[in-house]
Amino acid sequence: MLSRNRVQTAVLLLSVAVIAGQTMAHNGAMGIVMERMDGMSILGDHAKSVGDMLKGKTPLDLAAVEEAAQDFVTHGDSIPALFPDTENSRQSTATEALPAIWENWDEFVALAEKFTGDSQALLTVASDLSDGTMSVDEQSRAVRTVFFKAAKNCSACHERFRLDQD
């Protein structure tokens, strides 16, 4: 059996490794830039998961779709606050945000609001489908319709306001 000190040391080392890994994953991003990159990574993971379900790579899991949609809504609501007009937010060496965000702020906020609204629609559909009255194929079609609307908002925003990642 491990001593209490060894367990505490192992937990501490694991925590340091996780934090270091996150920092390395975002090329030294810190502060608000790191916060928005972490949030976008979570959304990307959810989008991939739901996309895989809709492509038939994994079984449709309405609870997972609902969780993804809730995170989309929560993050969508916070997007404008994650892009303050500050030097660090604009010019951090790790940022992928283009100056067009602040030059076209109203358009940027409108895309975030559209994403949030479409994500709310996805959340509603996923919630409503959990009653089990539709077949899996019908559920998948219903989710697909609203999911791709939300995903289009991500693409539109990235095309206009994010550094090309070629």
Image (cartoon, grey):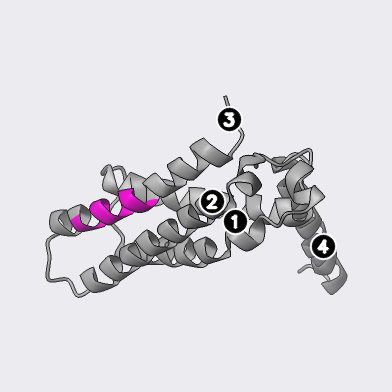
**Going by the picture, which residue comes out furthest to the right?**
5
Q: Earlier in the sequence, mark 4 or mark 1?
A: 4
How far across and how far down the image is residue 125, in percent? 26, 66
- Disc 2 from disc 4: Cα separation: 40 Å
Tag 4: amino acid: Leu
Tag 2: amino acid: Phe
- The answer to whether residue 64 is visible is no
Residue 108 numbered mark, or none: 2
Q: Quadrant of residue 124?
A: bottom left
Q: Earlier in the sequence, mark 2 or mark 4?
A: 4
Asked if the magenta segment contains residue 146, the reply would be yes
- Disc 4 from disc 1: Cα separation: 24 Å
Badge 3 vs badge 4, beta-carbon distance below 8 Å = no
Q: Quadrant of residue 85?
A: bottom right
Residue 12 numbered mark, or none: 4
- Camera-side residue: 122 or 60? 122
Q: Earlier in the sequence, mark 2 or mark 3?
A: 2
Callout 2 secondary element:
helix
How far across and how far down the image is residue 161, in percent? 57, 41
Badge 2 vs badge 3, beta-carbon distance below 8 Å = no
Q: Nearer the viewer, mark 2 or mark 3?
A: 2
- Disc 3 from disc 1: Cα separation: 19 Å
Q: Which residue is mark 3?
A: 164
Asked if the magenta segment contains residue 53, the reply would be no
- Camera-side residue: 149 or 141? 149
Q: Nearer the viewer, mark 2 or mark 1?
A: 2
Q: Which residue is mark 1?
A: 39
Residue numbers of the magenta segment: 142-150
- Disc 3 from disc 4: Cα separation: 37 Å
Badge 2 vs badge 1, beta-carbon distance below 8 Å = no
Q: In which quadrant is the C terminus drawn?
A: top right
Callout 1 secondary element:
helix
